[in-house]
Amino acid sequence: MKRILLIEDDAEVARLVELELKEAGFAVEWAKSGMEGLVRHRERKPDLVVLDLGLPDLDGAEVARRIRATDDTPILVLTAQDAVERKVGLLSDGADDYLVKPFHPAELLARIQVQLRHKEGSEVLSVGRLELYPKRRQVFFGEKEVRLSPKEFELLFLLMSRPGRVFPRQEIEEKVWGKPLGRDSNVLDVHVANLRAKLREAGAYGYLRTVRGLGYAVRPGRGEEVTEDT
């Protein structure tokens, strides 16, 4: 069970956030001030910190700086300030992400999950918003998981290992299936079609490219669906 340290002085906000996080399966520690939060962070070693910016003793930015000076724990800041300069300052102070109040609990959970994935997946292949985690055998486009069959995963892993490179059919067949499949086989075509469909369903339009007469490649999408593109 992942441990979340919530540093928030507003009891009503804290109760709502704590309830949502516990229902999502997280263990939650609540600290009511910046100093208490720093002590709990040092003692408990949480997996992620949800940090309110407006605390009664220490400014949330100062809490983020002190945590970041000794630890790489992901920090998600809750702030009522929507100014661009303030957001940039928060990221410079060590925050990994921020959420402007008022916010929807679903967005908070989604942002927490993204930060935890980044922390866990030190080995990650990224192409644009498409992320592949080899050890966990998971693929995400933004915040949405793309569920793949074992061969679809191996195919995507190969293509994402060299973004932009065009892999010839025979090389793909030998590395994914262990042998050439033969000129009459449509096994690779079927897997490419299925993989492309799943990526499109997740919103990853145009990432899987077909280069006629050469092979396949993964490149950042163009923001719109591309069919058999070169």
Image: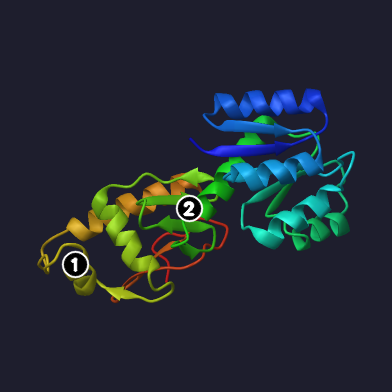
Query: Circle 2 — which element?
Result: helix
Whether the residues at callouts 1 and 2 have beta carbons within 8 Å, the answer is no
Residue 114 appears at what percent x and percent y? 56, 47
Which residue occupies the foreground of this view, 217 or 4? 4
The residue under label 2 is: 120
The quarter of the picture where the C terminus appears is bottom left
Q: Is residue 27 left or right of residue 121?
A: right
Crowd band around label 1 with a 10 angstrom C-alpha radius: few (<14), some (14–19), many (20+): some
Position of 14 compared to 10: left or right? left
Q: Is residue 111 visible?
A: no
Q: CA distance from mark 1 to mark 2?
A: 31 Å
Taking the spot 77% from the left edge, 58% from the top edge, the residue there is: 65
Q: Which amino acid type is shown beneath numbered disc 1? A: Glu
| Amino acid type, mark 2 | Glu
Disc sitting over residue 173 in the figure: 1
Which sits in the foreground, 225 or 142? 142
Q: Is residue 214 left or right of residue 107?
A: left
Q: Earlier in the sequence, mark 1 or mark 2?
A: 2
Given this view, does label 1 or label 2 mark the residue nearer the observer? 2
Element at badge 1? Answer: helix
Callout 2 crowding tier (Cα within 10 Å): few <14, some 14–19, many ≥20: few
Residue 217 badge: none
Rendered position, 36 above or below 128: above
